[in-house]
Amino acid sequence: MCDVCGCGNHGNTMVVSDDSARKTVEVKKSLLDENERVAEVNRKHFDEKGVLAINLISSPGSGKTTLLEKTIEALKGEFKIGVLEGDIETERDAERVRAKGAYAVQLTTGGACHLEAPLVHKGFHALEKQMDGGAPDILFIENVGNLVCPSSFYLGEHVRVVLVSVPEGPDKPAKYPKAFKTSDVFIITKADLLPYFDFDVEKVKEEALSLNPNLRIFVLSAKTGEGMEEWLNYLRELKKG
């Protein structure tokens, strides 16, 4: 299994021996150091191209792709939007966002539970090619559905957004603290379902802010549009710098 996240897809397999703990640390450090190096290359490239890069992380089914669809629909007249879609398999999410007017490249990990900076690097160059050498104003990186592993891998993004949907329950900040500690924004999605679930919004906000006082928090429903304008204005403000 992978010594970072257990996904078994990094190619750094090990034989257990008396000094396996020391070797595990070396493999993990090497993997994360290389990821960090490429992430900094990505960040420099984004900055040179004037691209605002946003990394979306969440559990499967939180509504990342639906939020992207609604965001693209609302902003495509103002900005060129590109999406790197991370999934274990299929092109389905990339097809969904293309249908809304965004440029999109699907990044399939073949089993890995998160995106890494080298794959994002390749994906962004593929996106540039798709745009005839141009670049998007805003790049959304939709990470693989997982609240654990993506929080350990910086991709070169300017902003990391963690999403939790109302049906998932209110305990996600307490259970997955690193996802909230390493993020800049926390979005509570599917707010239209609040009347049907035991989800105390203020308590969830309080727990998230206790982990990261600098979190910007949005409560919204992509389905009804509730809270969407605040989110869209935030993106506009970010792009203005």
Image (cartoon, rainbow, N blue to C red):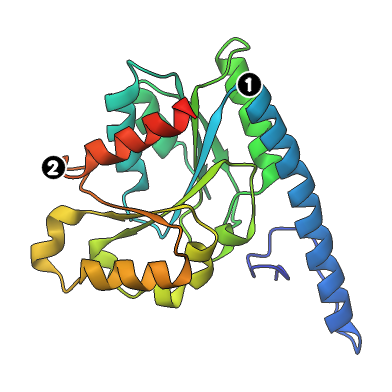
Residue 184 drawn at (x, y percent): 48, 52
* Spot occupied by residue 176 in the image (x, y as percentages of width and height): 47, 72
* Residue that numbered label 1 is attached to: 49
Quarter that holds the N terminus: bottom right
Which amino acid type is marked by label 2?
Thr
Q: Residues within 10 Å of mark 2 (few under 14, many from 20)?
A: few
Q: Of all residues shown, which one is farthest toward the top?
A: 132
The image quadrant that residue 217 belongs to is bottom left
In the rendered image of this protein, does residue 59 appear above or below residue 100? below
Residue 140 in view in this figure: yes
Question: Measured along the vertical axis of the image, is residue 50 above or below residue 166?
Answer: above
Measured Cα–Cα span from mark 2 to mark 1: 34 Å
Discs 2/1, front: 1
Q: Nearer the viewer, residue 142 or 180?
A: 180
Neighbour tally class for label 1: few under 14, some 14-19, many 20 plus, Cα within 10 Å? few
Residue at the (46%, 36%) spot, across then down: 91
Q: Residue furthest bottom?
A: 18
Lower position in the chain sequence, tag 2 or tag 1: 1
Of 40 and 116, nearer the camera is: 40
For image coordinates 36% across by 37% down, the residue present is 234
- Label for residue 224? 2
